[in-house]
Amino acid sequence: MTNIDSDNSREWAEQAYALLKKRQEEQKQELAKQEERKQELAKQEEQKQELAKQEEQKQELAKQEEQKQELAKQEEQKQELAKQEEQKQELENQDLINVASNENFPGSLKTIDETELGEFDDNFTWSAMVLAAQGKKINQISIDEIDWLTKLRRGLEETRKGFVTELLDKLGDDPLTPESLDDLETLLIRADVGIDSTDKVISSLRTKLNEEVVGGEAGIKFLKKELKLIIDKPIKNSGTDILVPQKGKLNVWLLVGVNGVGKTTTLGKLAYLSSKSNYKTLIAAADTFRAAAVEQLKVWGDRSNVDVISNQSKNADPAAVVFDAINSAKKRNVDLLLVDTAGRLQTKNNLMDELAKIKKIIDKKVPDAIVESLLVLDASQGQNGLKQAKSFAKSADLSGAIITKLDGTSRGGVSLAVSEEVNLPIRFIGAGEGIKDLRPFNSYEFVEAMLADK
Ligand SMILES: Nc1nc2c(ncn2[C@@H]2O[C@H](COP(=O)(O)OP(=O)(O)O)[C@@H](O)[C@H]2O)c(=O)[nH]1
Ligand SMILES: [Mg+2]
């Protein structure tokens, strides 16, 4: 807990927990009410069908009657018809009621499970403190945020284990020495932070050591600050802190990267985030190489109610799919078009040509579109991921990176190498296979999770 400066933070966390608990209770009650209402509607529907059946029977009877006593009972028939008219009216009225009440309860169609509030434990306290340290107020935080930070910290556990824990063991409570800097250097390299970033951090620590005595705890604090500076630099240079679609324009985000890094999964999670944030979203299935890719995307699209534009014919041209998707996006006034692309490594030149062709189509059809080419990298690939980033950056004109699979890898440090050596702003990070396991990148949270001391 010592890593975060925040007064009374435990008390803060307790209050936040109580508030979230109350909010969740209220939500549960609301859901129960909706469920009741749904059953009520179902009952009404049954009644309506029953009435319709009676109506049919009556008409049948009336017909028979008509045939038998056509002349004699004309008067009676008139009355019968009048009655039927009345009943019909009643049915129509009921129809209106049903439509109206369905519209009132879109919540009952929810497909994504609400996150459950967990225990008031160390995870909650740490997450709440990270939020508090960023100036969040108690009533501004959500269970999802707490849940995500918990996942992030857990995800970076492996990276942390071979790193901070060991470092703290080595340092003890003693001030830093030139020897402990050597240890730190080794640990940073081992966590795939990269040579350049490591050199940078170590040399500024060395300068600091020459000027003053630095205790273990202060050393960690300084280290966090330095690492954060490295990750923040390309983000600052881009002029955009958090990547969001610009309203009033077509935003096109291309997800690129080699096979298996998590492009399609990430795209699915992005579609969820985007549509949940009320951006009109569309998916283009431009990985036409893998037969199952379209199906995989459709499943993700269904989960967040986002349509998928695809071309099922074998070896369809990816640029043609993007062409169709742009037409459709323009027609529907889409804010964000997410484009999934193929990632065959063996034919890398083709891959780059394909990406160039896709970009050309976008430029031609929507010159004022805001295009982002986001490189997806699998954190568990460590230095290999860094190599991919360098080679893509050379030929694919990238504007940002997304780091996936931070859960359960010991190589989360690669994010720093990508920032320092490829100069790419990290835009999102993924830590799991669920639809909510992707969040906009936040350097403060990332560094806190990577160096948390428990
Ligand atoms: N644990 C974990 N698995 C992930 C994550 N992102 C993607 N995956 C898995 O990685 C595998 C490849 O993902 P996919 O999206 O098909 O990669 P693509 O070939 O780049 O499109 C799948 O089994 C995904 O479920 C993540 O953040 N964490
Ligand atoms: Mg894919």
Image: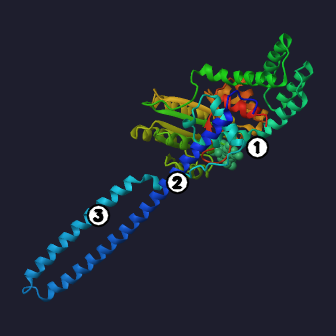
Measure the C-alpha gap from mark 1 to mark 3: 55 Å
Q: Earlier in the sequence, mark 1 or mark 3?
A: 3
Query: Which tag is nearer the camera, tag 2 or tag 3?
Result: 2
**What's the colour scheme?**
rainbow
Give residue 59's position: percent from left, percent from top.
22, 78
Query: Which tag is nearer the camera, tag 1 or tag 3?
Result: 3
| Residue occupying image coordinates x 25% and y 76% | 55
Which quadrant holds the N terminus?
top right
Q: Which mark is residue 408?
A: 1
The amino acid on which the numbered mark 2 sits, given as a three-letter code, is Lys
Residues 176 and 352: in front is 176
Label 1 sits on a secondary structure element that is loop
The amino acid on which the numbered mark 1 sits, given as a three-letter code, is Gly
- Seen in the picture, residue 145 relative to 82 is either above or below; the reply is above
Measure the C-alpha gap from mark 2 to mark 1: 33 Å
Label 2: which residue? 28
The residue most toward the right is: 179
Residue 194 at least partly seen: yes
Give residue 108's position: percent from left, percent from top.
46, 56
Left or right of 426? Residue 382 is right
Label 2 sits on a secondary structure element that is helix
Label 3: which residue? 94
